[in-house]
Image (cartoon, rainbow, N blue to C red):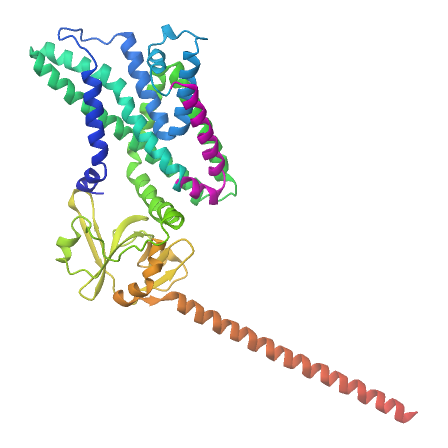
């Protein structure tokens, strides 16, 4: 995905981060002649702010249920959190009420039950999954308030001591650092969430054992819940564990993002549209062309639709997002990768299109094994509404008609074989009957 596309996709989030970081820094007083050493209290607050961010990224519902429950319990006065700096901060957050705890508890239980089964998991991801994502983004952005209140002020004071800066210079530097930390917190949310979702998708789509997806759901919820409790009890140690998870998530982010995008585009969005936007028709040419595509084809484009390459050949990764393009009477696969690398492959020979239960498949080389085909592309199921137009414009061969014709021929062959077997059986029965009749006739003649 290109930097420009990423920026456009997350522009509204970046604006919110700017606002939150400004509020966080403006509401915190700092001393321009402060110490350049973190206190134990500040380290505890910083660890307590970062550690739950990992669990918020993994499952916002579970994390907020435990955090709101802990905050509501502390506010009840049963336990005095004076010795825990982050817990004192937690009690002041708006989520630390009994009503919020009950709401998130009920939503978490509903989400857990729906995720246990495959068919209901897609429904959960298309409905509650969207709500969980929005809540997770809001919670991660709100969590930067605590990060900004400690780290940005400390950094500005340290820089002020080293540079002899004025109050205005430290004030500006504090806001810049605060915004940077807010963006960093959001990046942590995206990276961890993508890795957890990719693991979840692998367990759901490619589980060799029935029920393994449900087992993974139980294990995931238990692990995230225990980590959130651990973050409350020992935020510094939990932050170290979180940093290790973050490093792993960064290493696998590219592959995880491909898998997450494939699942969202092929399963979640079509399922959501089937529920709430049944009249939606996805155009064959979008209003806004993908980055670099219009320039490459000089706007002579008849078809431009998203697809996912399903076999690792022709310089494409498996399940990588690309575009099926029809331009000047030829079919192409197009992809403009990160750092400007462009892949443009012309599709030669016959190209087939097949409507399946979950998606539409476009492929060459009529082989039973998809991995042996030179091109095998998966399109969103919504394109079945304009399948005829797609066939006419791209000069595709309707594979469903071929399969139907084969089924008819196979049925005719089976019917013909059955007829022949029936005729032979009738002949044998008739011959046996005549033989028996002749035997009885000779017997009675002798009598």
Using the image, determine if residue 24 lies above or below residue 369. above
Query: In the rendered image of this protein, does residue 425 appear above or below residue 385?
Result: below
| Residue 11 placement (x, y as % from top left) | 20, 36
The magenta region covers: 96-125
Count of number-bearing discs: 0
The percent coordinates of residue 296 (x first, y second) are 14, 55
- In this view, the residue farthest toward the right is 447
- Based on the picture, tell me whether residue 102 belongs to the magenta stretch: yes
Is residue 438 among the parts visible in the rendering?
A: yes
Q: Quadrant of residue 68?
A: top left
Pick the quarter of the image with the N terminus. Answer: top left
Q: Does the magenta-highlighted stretch encompass residue 48?
A: no
In the image, residue 204 lies at what x, y percent? 44, 42
Screen quadrant of the C terminus: bottom right
Q: Is residue 175 left or right of residue 187?
A: left
Q: Is residue 269 above or below residue 90?
A: below
Q: Indicate the quadrant where residue 169 lies.
A: top left
Q: Position of residue 321 (x, y in %)?
A: 28, 48
Q: Nearer the viewer, residue 276 or 192?
A: 276
Q: Which residue is located at x 31 percent, y 23 percent?
A: 243
Question: Does the rendering let one see residue 317?
Answer: no
Q: Main secondary structure of the magenta part?
A: helix
- Give whichever of 271, 298 is nearer the camera: 271
Would you say 122 lies left or right of 89 here? Answer: right
- With 215 as the anchor, is 438 left or right in this view? right
Q: Residue at x 36, y 19 (%)?
A: 238
Q: Is residue 287 left or right of residue 255?
A: left
């Amino acid at each position: 995905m290109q930097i420009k596309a990423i920026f456009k996709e997350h522009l509204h989030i970046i604006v919110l981060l700017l606002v939150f970081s400004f509020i966080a820094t403006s509401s915190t007083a700092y001393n321009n002649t402060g110490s350049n050493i973190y206190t134990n209290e500040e380290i505890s607050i910083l660890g307590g702010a970062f550690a739950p961010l990992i669990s918020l990224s993994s499952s916002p519902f579970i994390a907020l249920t435990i955090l709101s429950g802990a905050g509501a319990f502390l506010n009840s006065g049963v336990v005095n959190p004076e010795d825990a700096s982050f817990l004192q901060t937690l009690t002041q957050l708006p989520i630390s009420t009994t009503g919020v705890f009950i709401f998130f508890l009920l939503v978490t239980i509903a989400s857990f039950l729906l995720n246990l089964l495959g068919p209901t998991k897609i429904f959960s991801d298309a409905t509650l999954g969207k709500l969980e994502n929005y809540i997770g983004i809001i919670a991660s952005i709100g969590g930067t308030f605590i990060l900004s209140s400690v780290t940005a002020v400390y950094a500005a004071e340290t820089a002020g001591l080293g540079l002899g800066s004025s109050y205005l210079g430290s004030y500006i530097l504090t806001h810049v650092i605060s915004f940077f930390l807010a963006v960093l917190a959001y990046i942590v949310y995206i990276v961890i969430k993508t890795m957890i979702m990719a693991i979840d998708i692998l367990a759901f789509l490619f589980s060799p054992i029935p029920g393994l997806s449900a087992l993974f759901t139980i294990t995931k919820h238990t692990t995230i819940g225990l980590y959130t409790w651990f973050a409350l009890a020992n935020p510094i140690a939990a932050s170290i564990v979180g940093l290790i998870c973050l490093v792993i998530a960064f290493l696998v982010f590219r592959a995880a993002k491909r898998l997450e995008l494939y699942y969202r585009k092929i399963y979640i969005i079509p399922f959501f549209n089937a529920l709430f936007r049944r009249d939606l028709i996805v155009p064959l040419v979008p209003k806004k062309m993908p980055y670099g595509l219009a320039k490459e084809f000089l706007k002579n484009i008849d078809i431009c639709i998203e697809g996912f390459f399903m076999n690792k050949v022709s310089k494409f990764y498996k399940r990588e997002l690309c575009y099926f393009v029809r331009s000047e009477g030829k079919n192409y696969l197009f992809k403009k990768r990160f750092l400007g690398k462009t892949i443009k492959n012309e599709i030669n020979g016959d190209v087939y299109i097949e409507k399946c239960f979950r998606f539409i498949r476009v492929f060459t080389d009529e082989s039973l094994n998809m991995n042996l085909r030179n091109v095998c592309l998966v399109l969103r199921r919504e394109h079945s509404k304009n399948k005829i137009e797609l066939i006419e414009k791209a000069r595709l061969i309707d594979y469903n008609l071929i399969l139907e014709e084969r089924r008819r021929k196979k049925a005719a062959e089976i019917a013909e074989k059955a007829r022949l077997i029936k005729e032979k059986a009738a002949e044998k029965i008739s011959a046996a009957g005549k033989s028996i009749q002749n035997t009885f006739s000779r017997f009675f003649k002798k009598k």
